[in-house]
Image (spheres, helix red, strand yellow):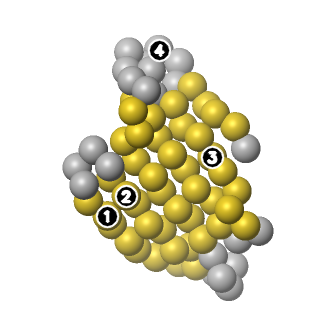
């Protein structure tokens, strides 16, 4: 999908998006050339999004589900 640059960011943060499948996307965040975060977004039913956030900088993984608002 491509790489986005944050204008005016002194740490030169970049975000890379990659389509993993028709229902999943992976976002990789870089700061000063190093990976800081890898986040996967996936849906199975179109009503919820499962999120897995691997915080590489702090060696933590967080998972949660977002429900579609009505």
Earlier-in-chain disc, 3 versus 2: 3
Residue 11, x across and y down, in percent: 37, 21
Report which residue position mark 2 lands on. Answer: 54
Of labels 1 and 4, earlier in sequence is 4
- The reply to whether callout 3 and callout 4 are in contact (CB within 8 Å) is no
- Nearer the viewer's eye, disc 3 or disc 4? 3
Of helix, strand and loop, which one carries label 4? loop
Question: Is mark 2 in CB contact (under 8 Å) with mark 1?
Answer: yes
Q: Which quadrant of the figure has residue 16?
A: top right
Among the two numbered marks 3 and 4 on one chain, the one whose residue lies closer to the N terminus: 4
Q: Quadrant of residue 15?
A: top right
The spot of residue 61 in percent (x, y) is: 31, 64
For label 1, the residue is 61
Q: Is residue 66 left or right of residue 32?
A: right
Q: Residue at x 51, y 46 (%)?
A: 28
Q: Residue furthest right?
A: 22
Q: Which residue is mark 3?
A: 17
* Residue drawn at x 26%, y 59% as measured from the top left: 60
Q: Residue at x 68, y 85 (%)?
A: 45
Label 3 SS: strand
Q: Would residue 57 be found to the left or right of residue 50 on screen?
A: left
Q: Which mark is residue 8?
A: 4
Extreme-left residue of the structure: 58
The residue under the point 32% across, 49% down is 56
Chain-order first, disc 2 or disc 1: 2
Front tag of 4 and 2? 2
């Amino acid at each position: 999908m491509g790489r986005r640059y944050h204008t005016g960011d002194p740490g030169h943060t970049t975000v890379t998006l990659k389509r993993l499948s028709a229902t999943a996307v992976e976002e990789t965040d870089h700061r000063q050339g190093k990976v800081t975060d890898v986040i996967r977004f996936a849906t199975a039913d179109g009503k919820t999004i499962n999120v897995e956030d691997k915080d590489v900088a702090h060696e933590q993984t967080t998972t949660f589900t977002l429900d579609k608002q009505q």
